Image (cartoon, rainbow, N blue to C red):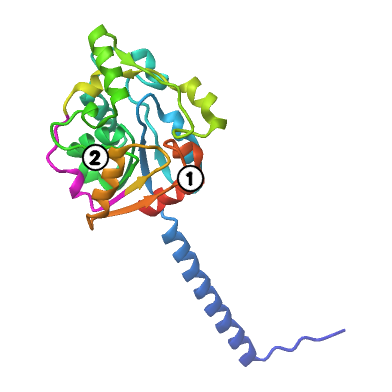
Amino acid sequence: MTRIHVTRRRMLRTVAAGGLVATAASGVTGAARAQSARKTFVLVSGTYCGGWIWRRVTDRLEQSGHKVFAPSLTGLAERSHLLSKDINLDTHIADVVNLVQWESLENVCLVAWSYAGFVGAGALESIGGRVSSIVWLDAFLPTDGQTVPDLSVEAVRKAVQSAVETGTAGFGPPKFGVTAVAERDQPFVQSKATAHPVGTYVQPIKLSGALEKVAKKTYIRLPKFPQPVFDKALADCKGNKSWSTFELPDAGHMAMLDAPDRLSELILQAA
């Protein structure tokens, strides 16, 4: 039989070494926890779309332990049965404000895509104190008194004007090409997209500068989608030290479908 002889000195050395390892491991674990601290995201979709378009990003963020809300604005997606001429920009702003207030959300990273730049900017007037960071993804950066058509391309302005003249509650959706979304996802998007409430486009926004007061701001441009107003927004943000800017040249306007992994990484980095 083999005997194991352990001296008192050796035992003390072993215990001490174990303590050092445990302390080091505790430090690593603490750092990992700090890096993966749970965050809260509110992802706001653009024209014709609802929370469904964020699902791939939502899944990735939730799988990493974060809290994610991707509301469908009134009259869109699963709320398309509520489409009416009474819906305006204030309605969509209230959708986001009420979500944050009723869910008692704090330290929110607010992500606004495309048209939602208007919605997010308006919402910040009421919930700016609850938002610690924002991400504008190929999104409008409006100024006080502007309407969405003021910053839109001619085809959109004509669609909105036609809806106003005919008295219809909504307009669109159009046929989406590869600059909007990869061909593989076009049938999926066309099956989900719904008419957009025209009243949200014709109501001027009321702003007092709450957006600029947010401490951490990020603008992400998707240059594959040709839109001069987004190019200008990117240039303006690049010239403003309070903004961080990124470009995803290989993704279409619907980057949450084209590049969900990379977009999720950028959103987490920006939070």
- Please provide percent x and percent y for residue 230: 30, 40
Task: Specify which label sits upstream in the sequence, 1 or 2.
Answer: 2
Could you tell me which quadrant the N terminus lies in? bottom right
The structure residue drawn at horizontal position 58% and vertical position 78%, both measured from the top left corner, is: 18
Q: Is residue 101 visible?
A: no
Residue kind at label 2, given as amino acid type: Leu
- Would residue 131 appear left or right of 55 to someone viewing this image? left
- Please provide percent x and percent y for residue 186: 52, 27
Of residues 152 and 90, the one drawn nearer to the viewer in this rendering: 152
Residue kind at label 1, given as amino acid type: Asp
In the image, the segment drawn in magenta is: 205-218
- Please provide percent x and percent y for residue 102: 28, 32
Disc 2: which residue? 141
Secondary element under disc 1, as helix, strand or loop, is loop
Asked whether disc 1 touches disc 2, contact meaning CB atoms under 8 Å apart, the reply is: no
Disc 1: which residue? 250
Query: Residue 187 appears in which quarter of the rendering?
Result: top right
Q: Residues within 10 Å of mark 2 (few under 14, many from 20)?
A: many
The structure residue drawn at horizontal position 39% and vertical position 49%, both measured from the top left corner, is: 247
- Please provide percent x and percent y for residue 175: 45, 22
Q: Is residue 144 visible?
A: yes
The structure residue drawn at horizontal position 32% and vertical position 23%, both measured from the top left corner, is: 155
Q: Nearer the viewer, mark 1 or mark 2?
A: 1
The structure residue drawn at horizontal position 55% and vertical position 76%, both measured from the top left corner, is: 21
Q: CA distance from mark 1 to mark 2?
A: 23 Å
Secondary element under disc 2, as helix, strand or loop, is loop
